[in-house]
């Protein structure tokens, strides 16, 4: 195992273990660099632009055109939880948000309508997940997607606490009979306004948090997808992947991330047999911490339990998936103009999106 990957695996296991046993925060950086990093952080914050307005509301039903008209089925309920990357901050149209893209993608594969309930909030950290889970469970979702972690890094949340809160959220959702896919913390070291040495540090801690999140989620019987690509090398080479603030993804950026997540959502719901799954390019069984570290460094990688029946275990199944093409979004508020009135049939939990944090416009 390469040295960096070994170090990431070791730190991830330490964080996850401390989280499981209620330990305090772990110092990942030496005190000697603290002053320099604070200065660099302030400069980066000044360089990040501001986005006007609230993110578009995407709650509602999708995929009417994909459903079999001869079969009367209740729609699948897809819950979205997390921060502004789950809300879709950075785009102007509901159909461009990750929730809408994935709802339409699920509908096309399942040939069934999908109802999206998005309770994510811009600026949220992992300590808001318990509240979001209560809202999501009320909608009785079959599948939940959680995208969280960037604000835990930028606002210096204790990683053990953040990982414990994420694990508890996954366990609660699984206990309610809901499949869970978590998009782990993105690589924040590729944001243009972030300069060395801060860039190197935030990349390191982003990947360490992502790896620790993976361990906690898989041990809680969920599965993860590495979202390093959300703000990773592919984005660094293509400025159009970012919104005008150079921090949040653009419509193209969210579509790229959704393409990486969609196969894992389909697999979680058993929409194609795992044994003949066409979206898997390569898979391997690795020790849990090594699997988490591997995924943190390889965008779009899925990690799930290798234990029979899922749940905690020493080994994890790592899948390097092919991306699925996203269909044109059909039906639901995503098909409407962004200035159109809100859908009166949207679920009550949709109002959570309007609670966007205004105190820090640079939060995700």
Image (cartoon, rainbow, N blue to C red):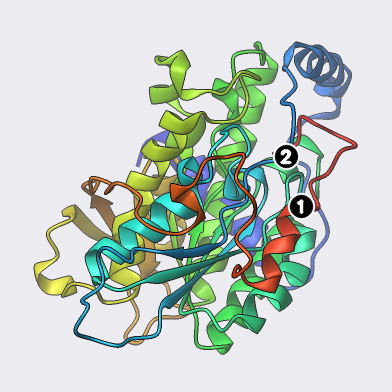
- Does residue 164 appear anywhere in the picture? no
Residue at the far front in the pictured view: 341
Crowdedness near tag 1: few (<14), some (14–19) or many (≥20) residues, C-alpha within 10 Å: some
What residue appears at the point 60 percent right and 60 percent down from the top-left corner? 343
Residue at the far left in the pictured view: 276
- Does residue 171 appear anywhere in the picture? yes
What residue appears at the point 81 percent right and 11 percent down from the top-left corner? 43
**Which element carries disc 2, helix, strand or loop?**
loop
Q: Position of residue 93 (x, y in %)?
A: 53, 39
Q: CA distance from mark 1 to mark 2?
A: 7 Å
**Which element carries disc 1, helix, strand or loop?**
helix
Image mark count = 2
Q: Nearer the viewer, residue 156 or 361?
A: 361
- In the picture, which quadrant includes the C terminus? top right
Among numbered discs 1 and 2, the one appearing first in the sequence: 2
Q: Is residue 359 above or below residue 310?
A: above
């Amino acid at each position: 195992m390469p040295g960096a990957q070994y170090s990431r695996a070791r730190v991830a296991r330490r964080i996850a273990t401390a989280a499981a046993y209620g330990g305090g925060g772990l110092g990942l950086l030496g005190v000697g660099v603290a002053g320099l990093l604070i200065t660099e952080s302030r400069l980066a914050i000044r360089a990040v632009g501001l986005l006007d307005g609230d993110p578009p509301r995407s709650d509602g039903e999708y995929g009417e055109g994909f459903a079999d008209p001869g079969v009367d089925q209740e729609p699948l309920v897809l819950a979205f939880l997390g921060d502004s990357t789950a809300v879709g901050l950075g785009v102007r149209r509901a159909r461009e948000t990750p929730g809408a893209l994935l709802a339409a993608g699920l509908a096309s594969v399942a040939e069934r309508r999908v109802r999206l309930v998005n309770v994510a909030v811009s600026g949220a950290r992992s300590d808001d997940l318990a509240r979001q889970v209560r809202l999501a469970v009320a909608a009785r979702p079959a599948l939940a997607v959680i995208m969280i972690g960037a604000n835990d890094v930028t606002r210096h949340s204790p990683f053990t606490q953040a990982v414990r809160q994420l694990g508890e959220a996954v366990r609660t959702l699984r206990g309610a009979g809901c499949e869970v896919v978590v998009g782990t913390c993105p690589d924040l070291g590729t944001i243009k306004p972030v300069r060395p040495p801060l860039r190197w540090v935030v990349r390191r801690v982003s990947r360490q948090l992502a790896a620790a999140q993976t361990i906690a989620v898989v041990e809680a019987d969920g599965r993860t997808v590495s979202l390093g690509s959300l703000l990773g090398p592919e984005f660094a080479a293509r400025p159009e992947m970012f919104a005008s603030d150079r921090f949040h993804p653009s419509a193209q950026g969210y579509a790229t991330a959704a393409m990486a997540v969609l196969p894992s959502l389909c697999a979680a719901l058993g929409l194609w047999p795992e044994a003949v799954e066409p979206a898997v390019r390569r898979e391997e069984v690795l020790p849990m911490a090594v699997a988490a570290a591997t995924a943190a460094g390889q965008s779009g990688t899925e990690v799930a339990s290798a234990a029979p029946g899922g749940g905690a275990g020493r080994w994890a199944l790592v899948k390097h998936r092919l991306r699925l093409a996203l269909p044109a979004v059909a039906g639901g508020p995503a098909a409407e103009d962004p200035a159109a009135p809100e859908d009166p049939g949207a679920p009550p939990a949709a109002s959570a999106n309007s609670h966007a944090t205004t105190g820090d416009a640079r939060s995700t």
